[in-house]
Every structure is written in C-alpha cells, then in structure tokens.
Image (cartoon, helix red, strand yellow):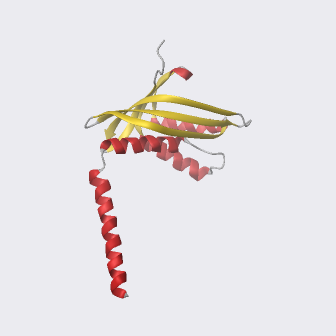
C-alpha cells in the first residue's frame, strides 16, 4: 500500500513539474497576450459588493497590465488622451460613484503582430454597466491595442476604438 501511494505521489509530482515546464517554456507569445486581454476585462470589472480590499486588489491588477503611460482613443466618448497608469486606476475607482457594477468581457482576441518588444492585438470588449439607479447600459466595442514588453511582461500602452463600418 505504501509503495502504491509513493508511486502515485511521484507520478503526480512529475506531472506537475512537466506542466510547469510546458507552461513556462513552450507557451506562445500569442497565448500570453490573449490571456492578458482576458485579464484586462477581469481587472476592470467590479461589483457593488466589493470591499476596500477587493477594490485595492483590482486596482493593482489593472495597474500591472498597463505601461507607465497609456494612450486611449475612443471616438464614442470623444477621448484622445494619454494617461499614466495611476490616472487610469484613479478614474476606474471613480466610476464606482456612478455605477453599482461594471462587467467587461473581452473575447475574439486576435494577435495581429508580435515582435521582440512590441505587439498589436484586436479584440471585442462587451461592457455591461449598471447605474446606481438600476439602469443597465450595454455596449460592445471593437478595440485595437498595442502592447510593449517591459521586464519580460506584456503591458498595454494604447487602446483605440476600431471602425466597424466606414462611411
């Protein structure tokens, strides 16, 4: 019985090590960038039930996904500005004054190009915001984003709303 347990434990440990090595050394840059896109949506989402610790954790998670400065160009909101990542996190926290919850789902991410230190990706973001009054706003936006590699980590440095239909 002891020999079976030891053998099973060794098999599980070996599988764990193999999985770690595979994820660490054989995951493509495209897969890493797609994961960063999904993480962006998760970090930017919040609910009214979040406590102070959850707000701080989400803020730090959002901050870790952004470059030191980030350009945001959104036609819908007539925005074309460059922000520090601290400014973006502050504005994100300020949204809680108006919305009781925000859910951002990022899907259909397609990595357009990957270099050693720069990448471009296109994805669709679906935002569902619930105002304090209970009114629900849903918007789906195609987004182009550029990323740069900082200390081995991909960080977003620009977001641009894409044209779906040309006039």
Question: Can you name the residue that lies furthest to the top here?
Answer: 167
The quarter of the picture where the N terminus appears is bottom left
Which residue is at 66% across, 45% downward? 48
Residue 95, image x and y in percent? 61, 36
Q: Quadrant of residue 35?
A: top left
Which residue is at 66% across, 49% downward? 49
Residue 137, image x and y in percent? 65, 32
Question: Can you name the residue that lies furthest to the bottom here?
Answer: 1
Circle count? 0
Residue 120's place in the image compared with 31, above or below, is: above
Residue 158, image x and y in percent? 41, 30
Of 90 and 163, nearer the camera is 163
Residue 15's place in the image compared with 1, above or below, is: above
Residue 132's place in the image compared with 18, above or below, is: above
Of 162 and 97, nearer the camera is 162
* Residue 91 visible in the picture: no
Which residue is at 63% across, 51% downward? 51
Of 21 and 57, nearer the camera is 21
Question: Can you name the residue that lies furthest to the right here?
Answer: 133
Which residue is at 60% across, 39% downward? 102
Residue 108, image x and y in percent? 44, 36
* Residue 26 visible in the picture: yes
Q: Is residue 65 left or right of residue 112?
A: right
């Amino acid at each position: 019985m002891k020999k079976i347990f030891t053998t099973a434990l060794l098999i599980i440990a070996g599988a764990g090590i193999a999985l770690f090595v595979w994820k660490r050394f054989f995951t493509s840059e495209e897969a890493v960038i797609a994961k960063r896109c999904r993480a962006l949506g998760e970090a930017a989402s919040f609910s009214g039930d979040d406590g102070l610790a959850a707000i701080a954790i989400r803020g730090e998670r959002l901050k870790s996904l952004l470059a030191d400065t980030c350009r945001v160009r959104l036609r819908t909101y007539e925005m074309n500005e460059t922000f520090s990542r601290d400014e973006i996190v502050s504005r994100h926290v300020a949204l809680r004054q108006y919305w009781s919850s925000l859910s951002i789902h990022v899907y259909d991410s397609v990595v357009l190009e990957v270099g050693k230190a720069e990448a471009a990706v296109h994805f669709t973001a679906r935002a569902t915001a619930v105002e304090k009054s209970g009114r629900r706003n849903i918007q789906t936006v195609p987004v182009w984003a550029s990323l740069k590699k900082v200390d081995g980590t991909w960080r977003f440095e620009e977001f641009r709303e894409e044209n779906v239909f040309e006039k």
